[in-house]
């Protein structure tokens, strides 16, 4: 589980948002292709589900240190839905 501390559009990329997230014991930068579906400022403070045990990956010259999980919301209903807990969970909580 992670908490979004900041989110912004990636210059020159139509689909990418750059997130700074709190994992409880550390902060990371993560990139996600959700810009067509979410305004960055609406995501700040939100708790999200994040895969944190992946190797860093360079995307558009930036390094992403994890993967944000989202579900396909289908045509006409907003494209994707970011996964988030239905109860309050502390940043860094394990998903099981």
Image (cartoon, grey):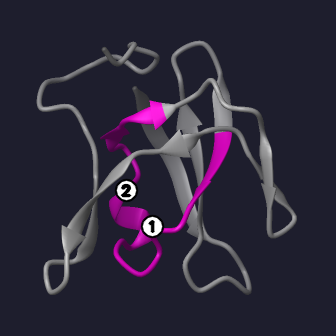
Verify whether residue 36 appears in magenta.
yes
Quadrant containing the N terminus in the rendered view: top left
Residue 59 located left or right of residue 40: right
Asked whether 91 or 71 is in front, the reply is: 71
In the image, is residue 35 above or below residue 54? Answer: below
Q: Which residue is farthest right?
A: 61
Verify whether residue 16 appears in magenta.
no
Residue 21 % position (x, y): 55, 38
Instruction: Please say if the residues under marks 1 and 2 sit with CB atoms less than 8 Å apart.
Output: yes
Specify few, some or many for label 1: CA neighbours under 10 Å numbering under 14, 14-19, or 20 or more: some
Residue 63 % position (x, y): 80, 50
Number of marks in picture: 2
Q: Whole-Å distance between the Cαs marked 1 and 2?
A: 6 Å
Q: Which residue is mark 2?
A: 43
Quadrant assignment, res 77: bottom left
Q: Which residue is mark 1?
A: 40
Residue drawn at x 45%, y 67% as measured from the top left: 40
Residue drawn at x 80%, y 70% as measured from the top left: 60
Specify few, some or many for label 2: CA neighbours under 10 Å numbering under 14, 14-19, or 20 or more: some
User: Judging from the image, what secondary structure is the residue with disc 1 in?
Assistant: helix
- Magenta residues? 29-50
In the image, is residue 42 above or below residue 83? Answer: below
Asked whether 31 or 3 is in front, the reply is: 31
């Amino acid at each position: 589980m992670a908490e979004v501390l900041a989110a912004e559009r990636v210059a020159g990329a139509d689909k990418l948002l750059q997130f700074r997230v709190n994992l409880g014991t550390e902060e990371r930068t993560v990139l996600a292709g959700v810009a067509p579906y979410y305004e960055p400022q609406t995501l700040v403070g939100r708790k999200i589900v994040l895969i944190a045990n992946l190797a860093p990956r360079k995307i558009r010259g930036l390094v992403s240190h994890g993967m944000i999980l989202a579900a396909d919301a289908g045509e006409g209903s907003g494209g994707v839905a970011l996964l988030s807990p239905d109860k309050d969970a502390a940043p860094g909580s394990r998903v099981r």
